[in-house]
Amino acid sequence: MKIPLIDLKAGYLSLKDEIDTSVTSVLSSGNYILGPNVQALEKEIAQYCGTKFAVSVANGTDALVLCLDAYGIGPGDEVITSPYSFFATAEAISRVGAIPIFVDIDEASYNIDYKKIESNITKRTKAIIPVHLFGQPAPMDNIMELANRYNLIVIEDACQAIGASYRGRKTGALGHAACFSFFPTKNLGGYGDGGMITTNNEELAGRIRMLRAHGSSKKYYNSEIGYNSRLDEIQAAILRVKLKHLDSFNEARRTKAERYKNLLQGLGFKFPEADSEAVHVYHLYILGHPKRAEIIKGLESRQIGCGIYYPVPLHQQEAYKQLYSDISLPFVEAASKETFAIPLFPEMSDEQQTFVATELRKIIEETQRTSL
């Protein structure tokens, strides 16, 4: 049985009629950029997240860059973030000329350890970007308390966590602003790139709208240097269809995550922790094990999808190695050697999931025998 890590084709087929109709409607309209579907999606995402405004952009990375730029964060400023994330989190900070300051993660949740943030705040610190990693919200009340005390901006990197919530509030409405990605593999994924910024700050939303269109609020009148970062109408139409099903898809992920935990007990895995005060949406199902290399090899030989998230912490990436050669972040460095993802997607059948668990059990038994 061949099982992908994420089955995008199955996701399309489950909504085929709705999606095909929405795409055909856009094609026949002749309106492809910043049209009615984009405007409607922005309103629907704002309503879904519980914010006053949502501004669409070309991708999740641009969402982070434009948000930082719109806040005036730039050269010489410092932004505190997690070293355990996709490269774009730190890349966006560097792209506006600011300096990423990496804080080690909480060993249990893999999110930034809020208890270690304060000691990294300096006179140059302007913002904190907590990452809701793998679909698990960061401890935002603690982070916001620190930010309010030091007058810092908090931008949620919620690219992996749309639909997740913390103490009854959805990601996207927990900080001063939030950034989402609609990359195809995300819980709410398009069939291309896409991104969104949510906020309650009207001035910020207006500035981002201007920046995304070459620094222009009126066509051919450019008040500053901006970007070309717009969500296209076809992607917006697709995302509007999928948004209606997001909660049920996320619930399916949670059900399957709980089932994995029951199926894989007693094999020495570190399971993803679900905070009792948060609703996890399991963008990825992450396991930890000291025998990761052997397990990955076994899964690949059985045609079971898997992936390492993330093999190199951000402070050890080639692009940052010279800047951070003298720092040690033990928890993220340990996690990067042991964590990996196994298949999890809403359309996954019980048969597929049982097969994955059964084969994992066999792989663990094999590694135990060979180590004797």
Image: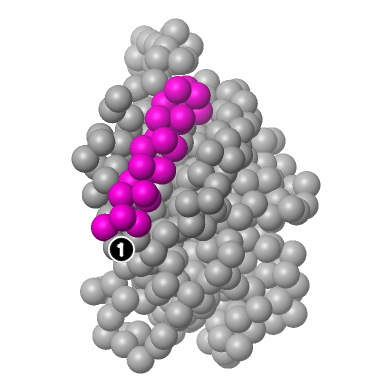
Residue name at image x 40 percent, y 15 percent = 13
Q: Residue furthest right?
A: 168
Q: Amino acid at mark 1?
A: Leu
Q: Secondary structure at mark 1?
A: loop
Q: Which of 261/18 is in front?
A: 261
Q: How many marks?
A: 1
Residue 156 % position (x, y): 58, 58
Residue name at image x 56 percent, y 86 percent = 120
The residue that label 1 is drawn on is 372
Residue 5 % position (x, y): 36, 37
Residue 274 % position (x, y): 64, 52
Q: Is residue 43 visible in the rendered structure shown here?
A: no
Residue name at image x 32 percent, y 32 percent = 4
Give the vertical position of 188 relative to 60 (above or below).
Answer: above
* Quadrant the N terminus occupies: top left
Give the vertical position of 23 relative to 59 (above or below).
Answer: above
Question: Mostly what secondary structure, the magenta segment?
Answer: helix
Stretch of the chain drawn in magenta: 346-370
Q: Which of 73/262 is in front?
A: 262
**Residue 358 covered by magenta stretch:** yes
Q: Does residue 207 appear to the left or right of 98 in the view shown? A: right
Give the vertical position of 17 relative to 274 (above or below).
Answer: above
